[in-house]
Image (spheres, rainbow, N blue to C red):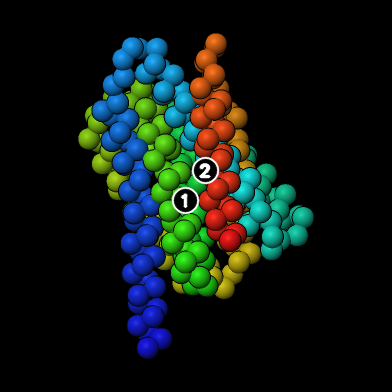
Amino acid sequence: MLESLQTNGLLQILLLTLIAGLAMPLGAALASVERIRPRWLETEVRHSVIAFGGGALLAAVALVLVPEGSAGLSLAPIVVCFAAGGIAFMLLDRWLAANGTPASQLVAMLSDFVPEAMALGATFSVSSQGGMLLAGIIALQNVPEGFNSYRELAKATHYRRRTIVGGLALMALLGPVAGVVGYFLLSDTPQVVSGIMLFAAGGILYIIFQDIAPQARLKKHWAPPLGALAGFLLGLAGEVALGS
């Protein structure tokens, strides 16, 4: 009976994390066919989606990664893990820029997705309802982040639409892997999960202010800041739902 419950739980984690991950290529596919006229409206929509993704990432940092990560750790490891994430992502950002392959949106998206998928697996071992709700929140975040990643890669590289969307679809497989790791290996080591979350939070916060926020701004346009507000509100609503 216990084995059957564990098998069902594992299958649910694999399915939920895969669906959450497939929201990334879904967002990329939407970005690849998006054509809005007049041109100024297309530009404002694009910047608003960038800001929405930034708001969602900021919500993930402020409402999930930092609170959950700092709950089980003392001050010293909190500072070390958070600072290490920011420094590591700065070095990665510099390396990508030096090699002419900017991918800040993609890095931020994966840095958000992987630790949250681990947390989903660990959460599912305690509460299947909480795990399903967290999977829905991750999926909603991944759509605008996949949209932004596609636009960034399409602009900075010569990859075709199918290559980018297909690459993001393969990256969705990281979700089930991270979920299984969280379920089997990290559910009994919450300090490790906390460290990973804080490391990711530091890196994401660096990327938000280094790359995403500057790209979102438009002179004499007010929709992008509202997009950031909506993205953060999505995260807030999800955090409240998880808490209830």
* Mark 1, secondary structure of its residue: helix
Going from the N terminus, do you reach mark 2 or mark 1 first?
1
Q: Residues within 10 Å of mark 2 (few under 14, many from 20)?
A: some
Residue shown at 45% from the left, 50% from the top: 138
Q: Which mark is residue 234?
A: 2
- The spot of residue 115 in percent (x, y) is 51, 54
Q: Quadrant of the C terminus?
A: bottom right
Left or right of 8? Residue 91 is right
Residue 23 falls in which quadrant of the image?
top left
Q: CA distance from mark 2 to mark 1?
A: 8 Å
* Mark 2, secondary structure of its residue: helix
Q: Residues within 10 Å of mark 1 (few under 14, many from 20)?
A: many
Q: Residue furthest right?
A: 75
Residue ID for mark 1: 137
- The spot of residue 31 in percent (x, y) is 32, 30
Foreground of the two, 43 or 210: 43
Q: Please tell me whether residue 139 is drawn above or below residue 10 in the rendered image.
A: above
- The spot of residue 236 in percent (x, y) is 58, 46
Residue 101 falls in which quadrant of the image?
top left
Left or right of 56? Residue 157 is left
Three-letter amino acid code of the residue under disc 2: Leu
Q: Residue furthest bottom?
A: 1
Left or right of 210? Residue 9 is left
Q: Quadrant of the N terminus?
A: bottom left
Marks 2/1 in contact by CB < 8 Å: the verdict is yes
Three-letter amino acid code of the residue under disc 1: Ile
Q: Please tell me whether residue 139 is drawn above or below residue 145 in the rendered image.
A: below
Residue shown at 47% from the left, 29% from the top: 50
Residue shown at 35% from the left, 63% from the top: 14
The reply to whether residue 106 is visible in this rendering is no
Q: Please tell me whether residue 22 is drawn above or below residue 159 in the rendered image.
A: below
Q: Please tell me whether residue 139 is drawn above or below residue 106 in the rendered image.
A: below
